Amino acid sequence: MEKDLSLFLVNSIGAVLMVKVVKSAVKCYKKKTKKTVGGKRKVYEYNQYLVPLKRSDNFQCSEDVLVVPRSEIEDLALANKTTVTDFFDNVGYGKTSIAAYERELAELEWKHNELSRSYKELVTKHSKTNKRIRIYEEKIKTLEDENNTIKSEYQGLKNNYKGLKLKYELETQKKKATEEENAQKDDIWSSLKNRLGSKKDGEGD
């Protein structure tokens, strides 16, 4: 946890005053505004300055503060018999701050490594899943091809069966017709024989 930073000042009557110091940076933003001047619409651009503060700085809303440039802090530090090095060590530029940055950097590096490891695991799982999907797709295509082949063979057998059945029915009908024709011939021949036989018997009498 970062400690509160303070600067000791001596007022005009010799009393020692402790002034809270917060380190920040002035941020500049470009803003544009439109104004009508002399009947003409003009665009004006200006800088807007912002000094961001952290919640841990414990400032109240609408509280008045003083912003002092770093260059002038040196004069304040020297005026109060504090070396510039010691002062900036206190406000976060010294060994304590460096150690904190190193700890933060190590933590970020660990998080980065963990995220990289998780990412690689997800990529590996994704690759394996895609491989399984490709295998299943190939199996499905093979089964579809085999199914189409079986359907084609079945259709061929079905057509052959219909052809053989039709041929059998035609042969059966043809055979039946031949048999009926032969039967009729036999009946005629038998009738003729009977008639001839009857005439011979009459002549003998």
Image (tube, helix red, strand yellow):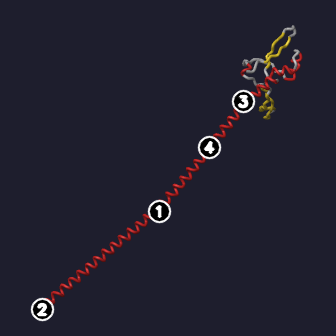
Tell me if mark 2 has few (under 14), some (14-19) or many (20+) residues whose alpha carbon lies within 10 angstroms of its own: few
204 sits to left or right of 45: left
Q: Is residue 153 above or below residue 78?
A: below
155 sits to left or right of 177: right
The C terminus sits in image quarter = bottom left
- Amino acid carrying mark 3 in the image: Glu
The residue at which mark 1 appears reads as 153
- Amino acid carrying mark 1 in the image: Glu
The residue at which mark 3 appears reads as 107
Q: Earlier in the sequence, mark 2 or mark 4?
A: 4
Tell me if mark 3 has few (under 14), some (14-19) or many (20+) residues whose alpha carbon lies within 10 angstroms of its own: few
The residue at which mark 2 appears reads as 204
- List x then y, in percent, for residue 78: 89, 17
Q: Nearer the viewer, mark 3 or mark 1?
A: 3
Residue 95 lies in what quarter of the image?
Answer: top right
- Amino acid carrying mark 2 in the image: Gly
- List x then y, in percent, for residue 120: 66, 40
**Nearest to the observer: residue 155 or residue 14:** 155
Q: CA distance from mark 3 to mark 1?
A: 68 Å
Residue 67 lies in what quarter of the image?
Answer: top right
For mark 3, give the secondary structure. Answer: helix
The residue at which mark 4 appears reads as 126
Residue drawn at (87%, 9%) of the image = 12
- Amino acid carrying mark 4 in the image: His
Q: CA distance from mark 4 to mark 1?
A: 40 Å
Q: Earlier in the sequence, mark 3 or mark 2?
A: 3
Q: Nearer the viewer, mark 3 or mark 2?
A: 3
Q: Earlier in the sequence, mark 4 or mark 3?
A: 3
Q: Earlier in the sequence, mark 3 or mark 1?
A: 3
Task: Look at the numbered discs 4 and 3 and tell me whether their residues touch, using CB distance below 8 Å.
Answer: no
